Image (cartoon, rainbow, N blue to C red):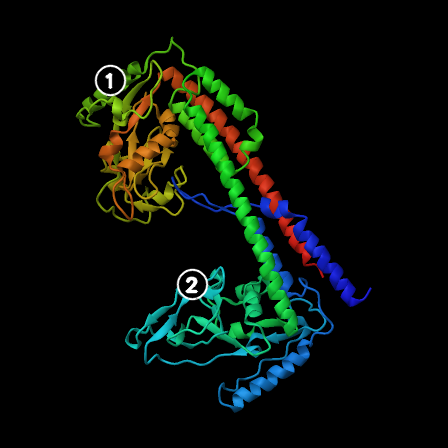
Amino acid sequence: MTTSEHTEQSQALITQLITDNLATWTGAIKKRSATGRGSNKKIELAGIKKLRELILELAVRGKLVPQDPNDEPASVLLEKIAAEKAQLIKDKKIKKTKGLPEIGEGDKPFELPKGWEWSHIADIGYNWGQKKPETQFTYIDVGSINKELGFIDKPTILSASKAPSRARKIVKNGTVIYSTVRPYLLNIAVINKQFTPEPIASTAFAIIHPFSRISSSFIYRYLRSPSFIKYVESCQTGIAYPAINDKQFFSGLFPIPPLAEQHRIVAKVDQLMVLCDQLEESTEDSLSAHQCLVEALLASLTNSENAAEFKQNWARISAHFDLLFSTEHSIEQLKQTILQLAVMGKLVPQDPNDEPASILLEKIAVEKTQLIKDKKIKKQKPLPAIGEDEQPFSVPDGWLWSNLSDLLALVTDGDHQAPPKSDSGVPFLVIGNLNTGSVSFDGCRYVPTSYFDNLNWGRKPTNGDMLYTVTGSYGIPIKVISNNQFCVQRHVAILKATKTSPIQYLGFLFLAKYSFEYATEIATGIAQKTVPLTGLRKMPIAVPPEQEQHRIVKKVDELISLCEQLTTRLNKAQNIQCQLADTLVNQALKP
């Protein structure tokens, strides 16, 4: 088999690898990390992202389009570049630069096809130098770039007097610019037109104006390839703002194909990226339609008028359970529906022999009276009863609507004074220690024991109480389940419980949609929302009889556990899809 035939066969296999495994590319999905109530739980189409990277990597390795033995080889191209460079130096358009060391076999990251050559980035182009703007100019900084498409779409026209100190680098039509600061953001572009007034770029960019036999578009695609990204990651320094310096950038290796092949590669990459766009759009549309269907079917449960209608709606869902609950979003919606059904009295049957909720409230009131006598709390002014217009939904017989404060001994928050700092003592927790939904002492501050001892009873969370974040990531309930001493900042509400306070029930009620919507409605502030304690105390709570609460809590725990199992199974399936995508990439890149 000739080299040409082998190349064509290899490329046919790669094309087949892409097209025959579309289910893997579209099925490999990852959830972007997010914390806090109401956080945006977007997903990443990881498989299609890998496919885009694979296309670029195959392109720069010469595996995407066939080689043509009639193309002028890159060795001849390099000779012509050398002559062009010498003429530009002679004409004093560019300065002579110090040559870089010869590229050894051990330096080459991968084998190139016949007719290609390795070079340094410094040898495929030049820069136009720098100047301080003296007249009006077009300023190109990182924010000017459309980094997804690689061109300048938001340049700024400035007067010389308003020129930033970084506005120095001269660029022209065809110049490639590469941001060396935070290079992982891939702020890379080709100057794709003549700008008026004269364009000046930020010194944050490395500048490559390619010689006449190097395609700007091919350079752009190589700089976005996994191979070059890997090189940059090996060189960059810094943590908050990692960067690669110009010397390291221009010392990077560059694979040079024949000029005609450069153009074929760019055209093929563009064609396949359009396919990726279509796959992305189709996948997102499918996920969106699935999401709408799940939400509509689950809404039919909460909107059921009676037991017969509920049973009918549930039958419709259960018949297609595995198909419906096949994404993290759909499982999360199922959780929310379980919680909403629970607090509406639709999750477990009512028992007419249960003591009504009014008896529970009487017990809590008696306990609060004793706490007042013991001087642990002050007598509280009664809040108005929850009117019908304030009730989000109707509740079953035996239930009633109550203010949150009527179910607890006290609703307060942390000390409003700045606490003294200490290297040891009692942990002082902030929202960052609580926003996962549990108490964490990792990295916490401390206050002197004397400060803690002087706090009143209400500001000392104890086992059986509940915390509730009220600022920033508000609406997160945290059960206190240990006897460890700690105190909290003012941005955390402390819900002090009586012995009969329905803390277990409140724990998932706060996670239900209606309670979070109430918190959002009363929250104040612009940059950082805060739920005021006055409003929190008035939160309308649908209170079941005490015995029914125990049945509800048991059923919710059982069903949420099922949801967690579904999530675990889904994550395993998605991990397998991602591993399959990795395997396909490795298979395609094998020598």
What amino acid is at disc 2? Tyr
Left or right: where 540 falls relative to 587: left
Question: What residue is rendered at 30% in x and 40% in y?
Answer: 488
Give the SS element for disc 1.
helix
Question: What residue is rendered at 60% in x and 86% in y?
Answer: 83
What amino acid is at disc 1? Val
Q: Which percent across, then down, holds residue 263?
A: 61, 69
Front-most of residues 22 and 423:
22
Give the SS element for disc 2.
loop
Q: Is residue 259 above or below residue 357?
A: below
Q: Quadrant of residue 459?
A: top left
Residue 372 appearing in the image? yes
Front-most of residues 509 and 397:
397
Q: Quadrant of residue 347?
A: top left
Q: Quadrant of the C terminus?
A: bottom right
Question: What residue is rendered at 23% in x and 47% in y?
Answer: 418
Q: Which percent across, then down, holds residue 486?
A: 32, 38
Q: Which percent across, then down, holds residue 553?
A: 42, 23
Left or right: where 549 falls relative to 281: left
Q: Which residue is mark 2?
A: 241
Residue 328 circle label:
none
Which residue sits furthest bottom? 90
Residue 366 circle label:
1
Residue 461 appearing in the image? no
Q: Which percent across, then down, holds residue 224?
A: 54, 63
